[in-house]
C-alpha cells in the first residue's frame, strides 16, 4: 500500500477520521481529495489536534516539511487506502453483514433491521449518511470484536458504485427496498437505476454458505433480481406471492399503523409507531431479515412497537393550538413524496391539509414533468394549501391547479424561510402540515419557524405577493 519508504514509527491508532475539525487525539487522519475539498490542506491542523498520524498521497509526503514526515503514511491513493483497510477489518471481524439499498426507504429499513436484531445481538449500523465511498469504509472501521452483526446502508448516484461498496463490505445478506425515478440526472431511465441497484445482489459474498437476497415482491423490477441468482431468496410485500406478506393494514389509534404479517412460520399482528403503508413495507423487509436470526415473534413485535425513526423522517410534531406537523424534510423524490401524500390524505381528524413541498433535485430533464405529476397527486390527496419552495417546485403548482386545487390556495417561494413565514400565518386549529423536500432546499427552517410562533399570531401577507406564477 505504501508508495515510498517513509520511516514512520509504529503507533497505536484509536480510530479514524476524515475531518480535521472534529479529530481527537489518537485518531488516524485520511487526507482525501474530493470535488470541493482537499484533505491535504488540513494535515497540519489534524496533527496539531493530536492525530496519531495522517495517510497522504505520496506526492504530498515528498514535499512535506521534514518535521512532520514521520507522522505521515504515504500511499498512491488515500481513498483506496481507506477502502482497503476497511475491507481488511471486515474480513478479520468475519461475521454476518447485511447491506440495504433502494431508491426510497433504505435508511428507515436499515434502522428497523438493526432494531430487530438488537433484541438478541450486538449490532453495528451505519450512522447518519455514512453510505457512500467514504461512509461505508468509515463504518466498517468501527467494527469491534464484540459486534455480532453489522447493518450497512449503500447509496449510489452512478452505475458501479453499489458494486464497489459491496466489494468493500462483502455483505452476505442484501436487501433491496424498491426502485423509483430518482437520480435521473445521472441515469437515462428507471431501468438503468434498477440495473445499478442489482449490483448489490450480484456481489453478495459466499462466506458461510450461499448468500441471501431479500427482495421487494411488489416491485416487478426488483422481483426479477432473483432470476439467475444462485443463493437464497426471500421476498416481502403486500401482493399475493410475497413470502413475508403484509395484510390488514390500518391506521392505529396512536397515530401509527397496525398490520398483520403472514410468512414462513409466522402469522402475527404488529404495531408500528409510524404512519403509512410504505413504512409497513420497510418493516416487512426487516422482518424477512430477522427470520434469518431466529428471533421470537413476540420480541420482534416489541421491537417494532418501540421503534423510533431517524430525525426528519416522518416525525409527528404537535404544536400549541392543535396543529400537527409531519416533519419529513430530510429528502425527497417523486416516490417518497407520493408515499407521504398518502399519509397526509389518511391522517385522522385533519381539518385542513397543508403541504410545504420543496424542489425534488437530481431529476434531470424529466424534472418539470415529474413535479407537475406530483402536483396532480397533491390535488388527489385532499391537499388544501400547497406551498412550493425553490426552482422546479413551481411546476408542482401547475399540476395541482390542473388537478383542482384553487389558484388562490397555491404559493411559490424561492427560499424556505419565506415559505415558513407564509405558512405560519395560515395555521388554524386542526390543521395538519406536511413538510417535505430535497435536502438542499433546507426545509428544516420551515419547521423551526412553525415551532417558534403561536397559531394565527401573524397577519397574512398580501394574497398575491407570492402567488402562483
Image (cartoon, grey):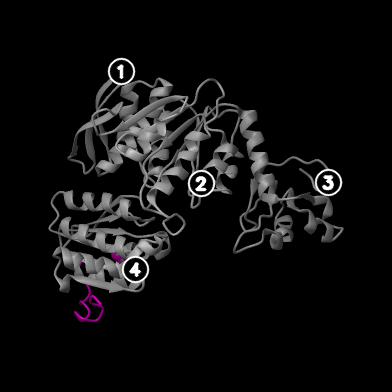
Determine the image quadrant of residue 350: bottom left
For residue 250, side relative to residue 435 (left or right): left
Circle 1/circle 2 CB separation < 8 Å: no
The answer to whether residue 74 is left or right of residue 468 is right
Q: Mark 3 points at which residue?
A: 8
The numbered mark, 4 or 2, whose residue comes first in the sequence reads 2
The residue at 47%/34% (across/down) is 201
The residue closer to the viewer here, 194 or 339, is: 194
SS type, badge 2: loop
First along the sequence among labels 3 and 4: 3
Label 3: how many Cα within 10 Å (few below 14, some 14–19, many 20+): some
Mark 3 and mark 4 residues within 8 Å of each other at the beta carbon: no
- Classified by dominant secondary structure, the portion drawn in magenta counts as loop
User: Picture quarter containing residue 213?
Assistant: top left
- Mark whose residue sits in front, 4 or 1: 4
**To which residue does mark 2 refer?**
131
Q: Which residue is drawn at 29% across and 29% down?
A: 242
Camera sees residue 469: yes
* CA separation in Å, label 1 and label 2: 33 Å
Q: Which residue is tagged 4?
A: 392
Q: Is mark 3 on a helix, strand or loop?
A: loop
- Name the foreground residue: 247 vs 376: 376
Amino acid at each position: 500500500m505504501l508508495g515510498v519508504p517513509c520511516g514512520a514509527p509504529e503507533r497505536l491508532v484509536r480510530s479514524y477520521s476524515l475531518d480535521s475539525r472534529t479529530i481527537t487525539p489518537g485518531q488516524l487522519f485520511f487526507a482525501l481529495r474530493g470535488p470541493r475539498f482537499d484533505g491535504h490542506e488540513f494535515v497540519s491542523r489534524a496533527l496539531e489536534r493530536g492525530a496519531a498520524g495522517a495517510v497522504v498521497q505520496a506526492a504530498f509526503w515528498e514535499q512535506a516539511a521534514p518535521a512532520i514526515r514521520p507522522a505521515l503514511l504515504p500511499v498512491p491513493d488515500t481513498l483506496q487506502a481507506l477502502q482497503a483497510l476497511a475491507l481488511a477489518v471486515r474480513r478479520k471481524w468475519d461475521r454476518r453483514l447485511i447491506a440495504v439499498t433502494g431508491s426510497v426507504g433504505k435508511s428507515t429499513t436499515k434502522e428497523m433491521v438493526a432494531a430487530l436484531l438488537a433484541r438478541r445481538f450486538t449490532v453495528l449500523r451505519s450512522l447518519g449518511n455514512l453510505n457512500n465511498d467514504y461512509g461505508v469504509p468509515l463504518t466498517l472501521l468501527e467494527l469491534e470484536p464484540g459486534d455480532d452483526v453489522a447493518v450497512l446502508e449503500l447509496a449510489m448516484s452512478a452505475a458501479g458504485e453499489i458494486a464497489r461498496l459491496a466489494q468493500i463490505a462483502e455483505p452476505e445478506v442484501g436487501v433491496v427496498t424498491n426502485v423509483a425515478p430518482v437520480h435521473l440526472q445521472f441515469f437515462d431511465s428507471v431501468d438503468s437505476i434498477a440495473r445499478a441497484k442489482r449490483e448489490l445482489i450480484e456481489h453478495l459474498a459466499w462466506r458461510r454458505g450461499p448468500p441471501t437476497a431479500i427482495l421487494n415482491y411488489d416491485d416487478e423490477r426488483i422481483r426479477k433480481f432473483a432470476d439467475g441468482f444462485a443463493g437464497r431468496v426471500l421476498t416481502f410485500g403486500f401482493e399475493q406471492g410475497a413470502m413475508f406478506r403484509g395484510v390488514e393494514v390500518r391506521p392505529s389509534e396512536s397515530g401509527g399503523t397496525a398490520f398483520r404479517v403472514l410468512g414462513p412460520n409466522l402469522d402475527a399482528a404488529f404495531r408500528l409507531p409510524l404512519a403509512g403503508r410504505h413504512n409497513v413495507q420497510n418493516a416487512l423487509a426487516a422482518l424477512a431479515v430477522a427470520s434469518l436470526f431466529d428471533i421470537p415473534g413476540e420480541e420482534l413485535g416489541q421491537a417494532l412497537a418501540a421503534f423510533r425513526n431517524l430525525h426528519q423522517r416522518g416525525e409527528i410534531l404537535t404544536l400549541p393550538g392543535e396543529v400537527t406537523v409531519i416533519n419529513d424534510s430530510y429528502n425527497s423524490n417523486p416516490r417518497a413524496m407520493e408515499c407521504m401524500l398518502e399519509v397526509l390524505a389518511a391522517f385522522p381528524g385533519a381539518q385542513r391539509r397543508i403541504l410545504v413541498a420543496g424542489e425534488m433535485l437530481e431529476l434531470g430533464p424529466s424534472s418539470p414533468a415529474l413535479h407537475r405529476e406530483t402536483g396532480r397527486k397533491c390535488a388527489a390527496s385532499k391537499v388544501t394549501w400547497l406551498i412550493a419552495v425553490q426552482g422546479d417546485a413551481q411546476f408542482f403548482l401547475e399540476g395541482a391547479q390542473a388537478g383542482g386545487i384553487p389558484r388562490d390556495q397555491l404559493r411559490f417561494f424561492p427560499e424556505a424561510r419565506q415559505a415558513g413565514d407564509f405558512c405560519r400565518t395560515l395555521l388554524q386549529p386542526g390543521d395538519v402540515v406536511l413538510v417535505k423536500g430535497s435536502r438542499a432546499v433546507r426545509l428544516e427552517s420551515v419547521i423551526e419557524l412553525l415551532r417558534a410562533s403561536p397559531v394565527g399570531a401573524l397577519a397574512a401577507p398580501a394574497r398575491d405577493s407570492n402567488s402562483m406564477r
